[in-house]
Image (tube, grey):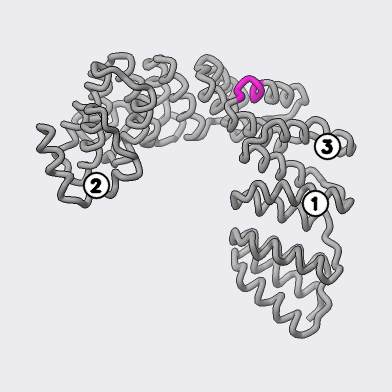
Amino acid sequence: MSLQRLTASIRDAGKKRQWSQALRILGEAARARVQVNTIVCNASINACGSGRRWVDALRLLRRMQAVALPPDVITYSNLISVLDRCGEYERARALFFEMTDRDVEPDKMTYSAVISACGKSGRWQEALRILFCDSDRKGLPQWPDVVAFSAAVSACERSSKWQLSAAVFERMLSSRLRPTVVTFGAVVSACERGRQWRAALDTLREMHEAGIPPDGVTCNAAISACGKALRWSGSLELLRGMPNLRLRPDEIARSAVMLACARASQLDLALDLFRGSIGGDDAGRFGGGGRATAADLAVPLHEAEQLGLASQQTAVLRHLALLHAELCQEVAIAIALVALVAGEALPIGELHEALHTPSAIRCLKDEGC
């Protein structure tokens, strides 16, 4: 088999996410004593990446080095991207430094991947240094690009540096680059983390003016930002507007609005929203619809615990528990809410387990539910 056909076969397997088939083809070529080249190995690493097989991909790189087959920028870039997608951020960073130590010049794909890995591992300073300093010295054309800027904005957002996220975003706009929904979403999420509800709404407005519709993640972040600032009407308005954007409000959005209403003593609205989410008379009134699940109240439970809400504010949560107690499959929510009001919050991860235990019913009866 020619190297061209071998490469094509491995690439085809990778496109179909058949990583094991790609490695089998490579193994057969090795047994047939075919002298593979860097291009063949790069295709194999890519195929491993399609199946999130970072260990196999890294092993291929080490085999290349063992037989003195020099990895190129594509080899390292593909592998760093695979490691980033698989959550192996420190390995991605280490591979980037190994690459530069071996005098392999990074390209835009490499830099964007390592910036993403730095952000996900909490190294926002390093992400910004690579974006604005290291890569500038390489003289890359059209750099930084949208992908790199978006990765840097996300890096700052993950470390709750909302002002830096906004600054990087403004730098991107001044470079006459068009942001994507991912970029806007990262900025809104950064505003939410920084409790900057006005900035979150301003960013949504900029999205609208740019003709880029927000996705569910972006809307949820804006709703949460308003809720944390006790702007319950703003969060409710955003929730109501989601269907107009062809977005179905999920449990995260509904829970955030419920908590916002509860914190602002808008108990009737919180109860109406909750009844709507379980398919009652007001179903769909606030964009809910469908049956609620244990996840519907996971967010308000966790945030109420963190905020240490007063008993008057948590009263609405107890009412929600009483409403839900009649639904056997939802009994875990009632247990968690009763425990929260009693000052003994249950870990969220144990809720689903509680659904299947006889003690669940007993716990409710003991609490007078």
Query: On the picture, is 243 further left or further right than 65?
Result: left
Query: On the picture, is 53 further left or further right than 43?
Result: left
Q: Which residue is mark 2?
A: 354
Q: Is residue 165 magenta?
A: yes
Q: Residue 164, which numbered label? A: none
Q: Please provide percent x and percent y for residue 147.
A: 70, 38
Q: Nearer the viewer, residue 110 or 301?
A: 301
Name the residue type under label 2: Ala
Instruction: Tell me the quadrant of the picture where the C terminus can be found.
Output: top left
Task: Tell me the CA gap for discs 2 and 1.
Answer: 49 Å
Instruction: Tell me the quadrant of the picture where the N terminus can be found.
Output: bottom right
Name the residue type under label 3: Ser
Q: Is residue 305 magenta?
A: no
Examine the rendered structure and indicate whether residue 217 appears above or below residue 304: below
At 66% from the left and 54% from the top, the residue drawn is: 82
Q: Residue 98, which numbered label? A: 1
Examine the rendered structure and indicate whether residue 267 appears above or below residue 250: above
Mark 3: give few (<14), some (14-19) or many (20+) Cα within 10 Å: some
Of helix, strand and loop, which one carries label 3? helix
Tell me how many marks there are: 3
Which one is in front in this view, the residue at disc 2 or the one at disc 3? 2
Mark 1: give few (<14), some (14-19) or many (20+) Cα within 10 Å: few
Q: Earlier in the sequence, mark 2 or mark 1?
A: 1
Task: Tell me the CA gap for discs 2 and 3.
Answer: 52 Å
Q: Main secondary structure of the magenta part?
A: helix
Q: Quadrant of residue 230?
A: top left
At 60% from the left and 35% from the top, the residue drawn is: 182
Q: Is residue 254 visible?
A: no
Q: Quadrant of residue 262?
A: top left
Q: Earlier in the sequence, mark 2 or mark 3?
A: 3
First to last magenta residue range = 161-166
Q: Residue 135, which numbered label? A: 3
